[in-house]
Image (spheres, rainbow, N blue to C red):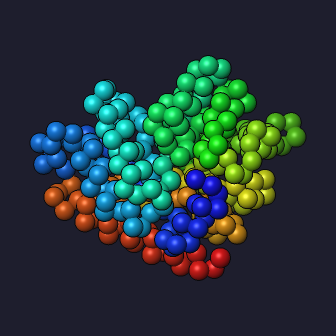
Amino acid sequence: MTRQELFENIKKKKSFLCVGLDTDIHKIPSHLLEEEDPIYSFNKAIVDATAKYCVAYKPNAAFYESQGVKGILALEKTVEYIRTKYPDQFIILDAKRGDIGNTSEMYAVSAFEHLKASAVTVAPYMGVDSVKPFVKYDGKWVILLALTSNKGSADFQLTEDKTGERLFEKVLRKSQEWATDEQLMYVVGATQGAMFADIRKIVPNHFLLVPGIGAQGGSLAEVVKYGMNAQCGLLVNSSRAIIYADNTREFAFAATEEAKKVQTEMAQYLEKL
């Protein structure tokens, strides 16, 4: 999916919502445990319930890998279902890969050739070697970790060098040598608030993947105020607040209502573009 195609879909749906499929077998409604593939059954219902209100899905690989082969198969089936039934959806494999050489190449093969995801999250700590294998794929995206929303983000990301440049700023500047804004996005946590203004000074045109609204307490209004650009430039993720809005047989309906609520707010912000 190209940048323009993504933007057109955002305008059409009046939404820049990404639904995180962090599917935990211990949190899904108990009646689904009777299904042959509970994780896939849950995901399929959530996708059908929310596809109208979002432009992207983000399955987090850890939740599937934790269940062994069955989990991996559920992930593959989920991605295939989205690709087949909702081909306008941008599919992000949240795997935070970060290795080098042929290892990184194999991770790229797994994400883009086997799973056929639209994008994959990548950690930049090992530098260009860990990113280049992913950007070789036409029409695919690398989403590089920049400034995350977790408490430990300050341990490294906010440290400054002798010139006062913070590490996340160095990541933003240096990585632009590796790929264009047609191939590269950045992860910026919603709880970072006004820090988006600093980020936009360095990457004014790139799309940002923004986790942290909903259960993590990030403010959508602040994200938009400081982070939105002329082509929206945002994919705002919500996971638990949507997919676990209810744990009864009405879980899909509850997910619909939560996704619609976020989309309605987003539509107001997009009117200004």
**In screen coordinates, is 224 left or right of 204?**
left
Occupied quadrant, residue 67: top left
Determine the residue positioned at 58% across, 60% down.
6
The quarter of the picture where residue 53 lies is bottom left
Q: Is residue 221 above or below residue 188?
A: below
Give the answer, above or below, for where 204 lies relative to 21.
below
Q: Position of residue 31 (x, y in %)?
A: 13, 48
- Residue located at (38% from left, 45% from top): 80
Q: Residue furthest right?
A: 163
Residue 42 point in image, percent of width and height? 25, 49
In the depicted structure, whether residue 272 falls above or below residue 64: below
Q: Which corner quadrant holds the C terminus?
A: bottom right
Name the foreground residue: 6 vs 217: 6
Residue 5 visible, this angle: yes
Q: Nearer the viewer, residue 198 or 106?
A: 106
Q: Residue at x 57, y 75 (%)?
A: 269
x, y percent for residue 236: 52, 59
Number of labelled discs?
0
- Residue at 21% in and 39% down: 37
186 horizontally vs 82: left or right: right
